[in-house]
Image (cartoon, grey):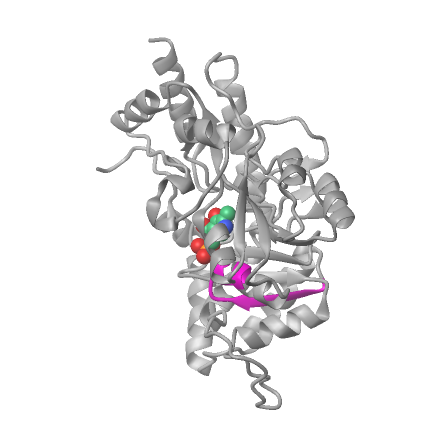
Amino acid sequence: MGYKVRFVEPDVHYRRMKQEIDSAIQDVLARGDLVYRDQLRKFEHDLAAYVGAKFAVGVNSGYDALHLSLIAAGIGPGDEVIVPAHTFVASVSAVVHAGAKPILVDVAKDYNIDVRAVEHAITPKTKAVMPVHLNGRVCDMDQLMTIAEEHDLIVIEDAAQALGATFNKKGAGSFGLAGCFSFYPFKVLGAYGDAGAVTTNDEDLAVKIGRLRYNGEDRQTGEYHYHGYSCLMDNLQAAILGVKLKHLQNWLARRREVADMYMRGLSGLTDLQLPHFDGKENHDIYQNYVVRTTRRDELVRDLKKNGVEVLIHWPKPMWQHPGLELTVSDLPETEAICQEVLSIPMNAEITDENVQYVTKTVRRFYSG
Ligand SMILES: Cc1ncc(COP(=O)(O)O)c(C=O)c1O
């Protein structure tokens, strides 16, 4: 079905960027700069500076960023890693594939990990905690870092949805031992395929991930230091991301403008909770604009019928997928969220007119 208001508009995005992107691609192809060339080194340098970390290492995906960070941090069999239950499955799969046990804990009203639940979940086997900065909002990193220090836990941030978001003016991905980013096409900074990166202030970790992503090889000496993986960031994607990174602040400003328009247009509806939370420390970037209502399924149907494309992140708690073999205790907030949330169109390309159409359609639904 063709929607009047699409969730994302990658074709519009490309048309606006066409000249710059085409020229970056042609440059890479003409030079034959295909594997780990200047474009990747430059993107890593610029990304680290943007995030506020000393190093960035480009990898194949956000998942690989998480997986390699866990392995490089020495997390493996016998270890427990605390992860929020309300996250994309890749956060948890990375822990499983590192050989450790994910301990799923509940989230708070802002959809981010519940700091009290983290404290309760700590056992002698806990080696790390993975805060996920969901929907473009950084977790309360003051409290989380304090807990981590008290219990000697490694912090691996899943910042896949939060490039450019800050907490006390510090960038997502610059708090823990490692910050993990995804440049999946529909992220705020999206490649034309899969890509990801790890940011860190720890040189040893950066070097180790730099080798792990390339079959364990030190490219200067040719020495294979360990059995690694093939998950280097593609040089062509790095060139494209380098072009796009220069525009990111403008795109994030537009997202915040759209979020403000939604807030003005949708506030006052009793059954509709909007993602504008307390917390002066936070500067959110709205990777997703998630609203919450007890009439979620009806609202989704109504919006779709009226030509508004919406998504649900996520309709079923992770532990209810038997194939994932996850065991959990009581996680009431995550369970309720799965029944009540929907994400409405949010991107830097959406027009004011389309934002108004969405708000009008939602208001009409509630006025019966
Ligand atoms: C919270 C979160 N973690 C991890 C990932 C994995 O990133 P990728 O799709 O680049 O592997 C994503 C991507 O959707 C994500 O949203």
Q: Quadrant of residue 362?
A: top left
Whether residue 230 is visible, yes or no, is yes
Whether residue 243 is visible, yes or no, is no
Figure label count: 0
In magenta stretch: residue 98: no
Where in the figure is residue 91, as x and y percent of width and height? 50, 51
Question: Bounds of the magenta span?
Answer: 54-67
Query: In screen coordinates, is 100 left or right of 367?
Result: right
The quarter in which the N terminus is drawn is: top left
Q: Residue at x 48, y 57 (%)?
A: 96
Residue closer to the observer: 42 or 104 = 104
In magenta stretch: residue 58: yes
Where in the figure is residue 254, as x and y percent of width and height? 54, 39
Q: Is residue 190 above or below residue 141?
A: below
Q: Residue at x 39, y 49 (%)?
A: 325
Residue closer to the observer: 20 or 77 = 77
Query: In screen coordinates, is 286 left or right of 126?
Result: left
Where in the figure is residue 152, as x and y percent of width and height? 74, 53
Q: Is residue 323 above or below residue 267?
A: below
Q: Is residue 167 above or below residue 160?
A: above
Q: Residue at x 39, y 43 (%)?
A: 8
Please identify the residue farthest to the top as the structure is shown. 368
Residue closer to the observer: 364 or 133 = 133
Where in the figure is residue 50, as x and y percent of width and height? 66, 56
Residue closer to the observer: 251 or 280 = 280
Please identify the residue farthest to the left as the structure is shown. 1
